[in-house]
Image (spheres, helix red, strand yellow):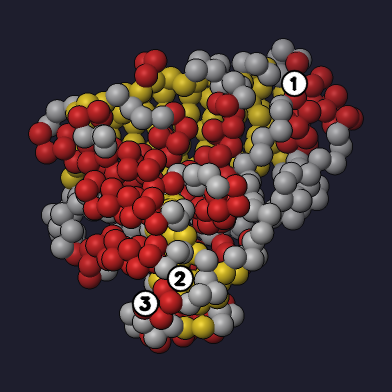
Amino acid sequence: MTALRRLAGSDMGATAYEDWFESGSGKAPEILAKAAAARPGVHNGSGFLLPVSECLMAAVLPEINYLPEMPADSSRRIAIAGAGAIVTGAHLPAYALAGFNVAGIWNRTRARAEAAAQRFGIERAYENVDQLVADDSVEIVDIALIPDVQLEIVQAAAAAGKHILCQKPLHEHLAPARAIVECCQAAGVKLNVNQQLRHDARMRSVAALFDKDLLGRPTRTMFDTNIDLDYDFPWLAGQQELEIMYHSIHYLDTLRSIFGNPHRVYCTTGCLPDQQGRGETRSTTVLDFPGGHTALVFASSNNRHDTQYARFRFEGSGGTVIGDNHLFSGSAAGDPTRLMVRSDKIDPEVEFVMRVPELRVPHSFVGPMASLMKAIEDDCEPDPGGLDNLDTIALVRACYRSAEIGQAVEFESVATP
């Protein structure tokens, strides 16, 4: 079937879209006409008017809610340890969008904390981390620092009764990561890990489609990423483990969040001879999941020469989802990304369009903090939570072990007890 689309309007606030299908079967125009007549002005959870093709989806699909579940009380006071680019470019913009209450910030270089406080209207820039932890008005500490320093801050914050959001990776190795989890358990505080890709609107949409059995049983998944990441940080220069630990960990964690743990993993790594830093900047990882499902994570993070892209494809026995996962999503003009969806349960000959206006950054950073706040309210585990995240660290370790020995590695051989 040939699909023809004309989009009138160029941004997520556009109010007029035309979308029609040219079909030899005659099914699509009939369904489209019915959907357009039944629901001519459908809005999604973000309040944007949907194109006709998405009105079609709304008429034939169960509700796909990809937005994070928000806490009833968003006023809990947050203090952030760290004022680097990830904080000023992602955490703080996301928290501003969500209406979260950031009360204080600390950074080793005080001027950076003061600049962030002024820019985002934060009332206090702490002189040191002890001052942050001692602030009785703060309920949540958001740690956005390198892995090696997280345990010490977690210990101090947990002892002070603060709930904690840690940066990913929780740690590069399982024993210190487990120590962080056990510290929070002993103190009776909630711990979440900032694995935000699992909270991304595109990934939550895919998970919902599988949950509603609109794609059938998972059979084949691929993340294909060819980008140029900025690894020009002094603390990364000497890292022997780089791409998987700090980039592909997102894809591995997201696969776990949707499909559970794999049986085994095979991984190869590589780098450019003239690259900055010692660690790998390319990796190819094959994961075998139960039921014959295979996933491929094909990642290059030092592409300097041609068009960069980040694509994904999820295939099931009854459907397929294709989309892009570029860091900021959308086009240069600000258009939202679209997921191309085929589902045998709806119509195997029609390719539906799911429109996702939320961006990878900053929107996905709302999810981890919202989940932590919900966990505090409901006295449950956040998503992913520290205990769950130990299996993500174990999967990363399995990848490196496989690359080292040149053989597939059983996940259970490195998984946490």
Q: Nearer the viewer, residue 137 or 98?
A: 137
The answer, for residue 1, to whether it is visible in the render is no
- Image quarter in which the C terminus is found: top left
Q: Which quadrant holds residue 127?
A: bottom left
Above or below — where is 353 with respect to 289? below
Location of mark 3 (residue): 129
Q: Nearer the viewer, residue 45 or 18?
A: 45
x, y (%) of residue 208?
59, 32
Does dot 2 land on a helix, a strand or a loop?
A: strand
State how far apart marks 1 and 3 are (Cα).
60 Å
Does dot 1 land on a helix, a strand or a loop?
A: helix
Q: Which quadrant holds residue 146?
A: bottom left
Q: Nearer the viewer, residue 300 or 132?
A: 132
Disc number at residue 56?
Answer: none
Horizontal relation, residue 169 to residue 236: left or right:
right
Horizontal relation, residue 414 to residue 335: left or right:
left
Does dot 3 land on a helix, a strand or a loop?
A: helix
Location of mark 1 (residue): 28
State how far apart marks 1 and 2 are (Cα).
51 Å
Q: Residue furthest left?
A: 405
* Residue occupying the point 66% across, 39% down: 65
In primary-sequence order, the first of circles 1 and 2 is 1
